[in-house]
Amino acid sequence: MEIDDIIKSIYYFYPKNVSIYETAITENSEEYKRRKSVCRNAAQDRTQWNLLKQNLESQFISEFGCKIYDYSTLGNVPCYHASVGIGNQLYSFMISVIIPLWSYRIIDLKTEKIEYEFRNPYEKSVIDAITSSINNFFPAYSFLGPQQHQIVIDDIATAFSQGPTIFDAIFTENGN
């Protein structure tokens, strides 16, 4: 998906030129209502998401001895979100429910530093397992890499961020 198409899709779910402090305007906008509706529907039908998690959990338990933790609230956050902790790393993966994109981030639990790309063969093997499963259960979805997802969209606001990145708008809604 091209950047222009991603941004156009984000505009479909976030009102343009509304400040972070104008919550009444945001909550009454058609864009906000669309996003909430899609999130509600995704929260009610988690079939593919649950199959993906089960698949990954069976892999991670057998290969790494760990389980998947699901953080998908789908309230204002327009994505499924889960993590697996392996050693001192937390591997989070997010699948948008508003745009057919997914991504990941790696958090060093000692330093709390967030990385958006793997740094060694071990991290690559974890990301490869996640990628393979996502491609099987969400075949119409594309990976959104850090070169794309760190682009700022300065004429929208999320719940906690004025001018969020693409990543914030479709995966976190809170600027993290």
Image (tube, rainbow, N blue to C red):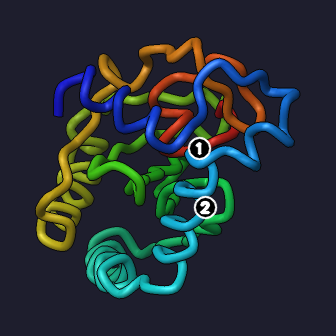
In which quarter of the view is residue 21 placed? top right
Residue 172's disc number = 1
Please name the amino acid that badge 1 sits on: Thr
Q: Whole-percent x and y of residue 150? A: 44, 19
In which quarter of the view is residue 75 placed? bottom right
Height in image: 175 above or below 63? Answer: above
In which quarter of the view is residue 109 placed? top right
Height in image: 115 above or below 101? Answer: above
Near mark 2 (Cα within 10 A), the count class, few <14, some 14-19 or many ≥20, is many
Q: Earlier in the sequence, mark 2 or mark 1?
A: 2
Viewer-side residue, 5 vs 140: 5
Q: Is residue 53 left or right of residue 155?
A: left
The residues bearing labels 2 and 1 have C-alpha atoms spaced at a distance of: 14 Å
Q: Whole-percent x and y of residue 24? A: 86, 42
Instruction: List the residue tagged with mark 2.
Output: 36
Q: Is residue 10 visible?
A: yes
Q: Secondary structure at mark 2?
A: helix
Near mark 1 (Cα within 10 A), the count class, few <14, some 14-19 or many ≥20, is many
Residue 99's disc number = none
Q: Is residue 84 visible?
A: no
- Pointer 2 with pointer 1, Cβ within 8 A: no
| Residue that appears at 61% across and 54% down | 77
Q: Is residue 39 left or right of residue 174?
A: left
Query: In what quadrant of the picture does the N terminus appear?
Result: top left
Q: Secondary structure at mark 1?
A: helix
| Residue that appears at 13% across and 59% down | 140
